[in-house]
Image (cartoon, rainbow, N blue to C red):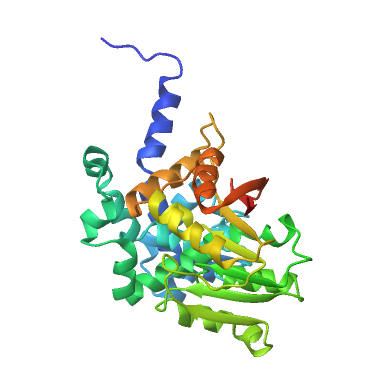
Amino acid sequence: MGTVEPGDDDRSRRLLRLFMGPWLARAAAAACELGVVDRIGAGSASCAEIAADLDLHPDHLLRLLRLLAGLDLVREERDRFELTPTGRLLRTEDPSSLRDLGLLYTSDLFLGAWGGLAAAVRTGDQAFRAVHGRDVFSHLADHPDDAALFHAGMSVGSSFAAGLPDAVDLSAARRVVDVGGGDGSRLAEVLRAHPHLHGVLFERPDVLPAAERRLAPYVAEGRCTAIGGDFLREVPAGGDVYVLCRVLHNWDDASCRALLANCRAAMRPDGRLLVVERVIPDGAHPWLSLAFDVQMMVMTAGRERTAAEYDALLRPAGLHTREIRDLAAEMRVLVAAPA
């Protein structure tokens, strides 16, 4: 007969938590989708009150709430439930809300592509293309609902780079060009922090309407311009500072070199390029950055890179790394300038 070695149960529980991760994530997402998190809000509510208000099955809701309590997202006291500090980050109204990111990460758009991971490792093919039939950006252009989900989640993801305006001295700059700037939330933060700046957002035409809505106050003030185009062909000229935030990791090396060359050709002689990515430390294994590296392998032809790998992409474009500064959530800003 077998024996249970000391520590076997702990190791088994850690593996079970790992294997059941998608279940737990979907439980949290369901609580958001059903309105349970926002119904509890900043106060507390009984299961019966929540079920009645949201037209939910009381017994099934109670079982979901108890799981959320086990995950430290809610707290149960005297048959009433309130959100924990972690759970509050799932509220729609929370300034630091991760709700939209959770809905994106647990969506069929993402998890379906991860179902092709084993095949991708065997073949070297792109998992998203194999599962969904085309590359992610073409898919989003033709599926507005998926695109809305994607850009809402990416806007939350970009909030991890919120420290960018303070991490780099922009006092001498006048024109900042955010290349691949998504819905404009990041550029809006930079313009809010630095009233002297004029911003240019450059994005694909199908993304531009959302960015124009987000940046409308700055456009009305004459402080911002939104331009549509293909950054693998060209980028707007005349910027003092160019920003590539979570852009290069979407692309293979050849595409990155083309984009960087376009930025170098467009920028002023004394301009700077800010590359905001999860720059992997040499010889280290930070799980968050490496999880995103595999995510890039699943979703795109890109990857997360080390500082040396980024420098190897910058040099052919006539750029070099000046410094690297740390941001939150393993994000880093690599400051590059003309060689």
Q: In which quarter of the image is residue 300?
A: bottom left
Quarter that holds the N terminus? top left
Q: Quadrant of residue 57?
A: bottom left
Image height of 39 relative to 216, above or below: above
Image height of 324 relative to 92, above or below: above
Residue in view at x 63 percent, y 74 percent: 188
Residue 260 placement, left or right of 320? left
Question: Could you say where residue 148 lies in the image, as x and y percent from the top left?
Answer: 41, 73
Question: Could you say where residue 268 lies in the image, as x and y percent from the top left?
Answer: 65, 66
Residue in view at x 56 percent, y 52 percent: 318
Q: Farthest residue in the bottom direction?
A: 220
Question: Could you say where residue 215 lies in the image, as x and y percent from the top left?
Answer: 59, 80
Q: Which residue is nearer to you in this view: 278 or 83?
A: 278
Image height of 102 relative to 173, above or below: above
Q: Which residue is nearer to you in this view: 192 or 19?
A: 192
Question: Could you say where residue 320 lies in the image, as x and y percent from the top left?
Answer: 61, 48
Q: How many marks?
A: 0
Residue 252 in sight in this render: no
